[in-house]
Amino acid sequence: MNVTHHPAITRCPRCGSERLSWPSQKNFQCSECGFVLYLNIAAAVAVIMACQGKLLFGVRKRDPGRGMLDLPGGFVDAGESAEEAARREIREELGVDIPEMRYLFSFPNTYPYRGMVYDTLDLIFLVEWNEPPAVKAADDLDDVIWVERDSVEFEKIAFDSIRQAVRRYLAL
């Protein structure tokens, strides 16, 4: 079976041949050199930070979704657990160390970036604060805002997976 291939991949990364076959949507083979590549999903983390009936959102500095709301988080690095990634991303984006967090759920997502669309699995964590931490927008964020639970404007959230995560969390 030969399925539709990824539009951005037209040549073998090993030998440069255009003789690629796509036995499934997640891998291709090169007829010239036999190279096989699997297009696996990228793991990403997002952290719902809740305090006194409010949720913390970041305002995205760059595309995709520049100027829209997002939960703090990002991609998991090689050799890193999801929990380590969440802690690192919060330090990078907000300048704080997070206390205990707990895993809530995950959602599939797509992340368009520079002409490629990456499939991701977004792992959602929860951190609950008694007092608002002294956060400062950095790295991929232009700003941070606390939003009342009942005032979340879902259409202003950049990604479908994050909209779903916030909706599910608010329904708990």
Image (cartoon, rainbow, N blue to C red):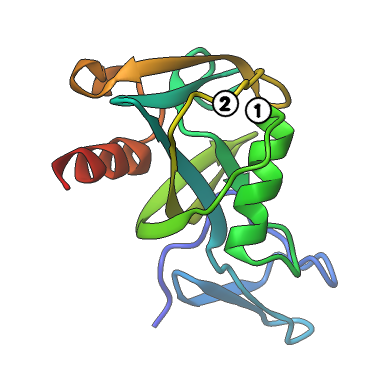
Residue 171's place in the image compared with 67, above or below, is below
Name which residue lies at 49% across and 44% down.
46
Residue 142's place in the image compared with 14, above or below, is above
Residue 52 is situated, as x and y percent measured from the top left of the image, at 33, 25
Contact? badges 2 and 1 (CB < 8 Å): yes
**Residue sitting farthest toward the front:** 130
Find the distance from the CA under tag 2 to the CA under tag 1: 9 Å
- Identify the mark at residue 133; answer none if there is no mark: 2
Callout 1 amino acid: Leu
Is residue 161 or residue 136 the one in the foreground?
A: 136
With 97 as the anchor, is 59 left or right in this view? left
Pointer 1: what residue? 94
Is residue 12 or residue 94 the one in the foreground?
A: 94
- Label 2 CA crowd tier, 10 Å (few <14, some 14–19, many 20+): some
- Label 1 CA crowd tier, 10 Å (few <14, some 14–19, many 20+): many
Residue 37's place in the image compared with 9, above or below, is below
Name which residue lies at 44% across and 58% down.
102
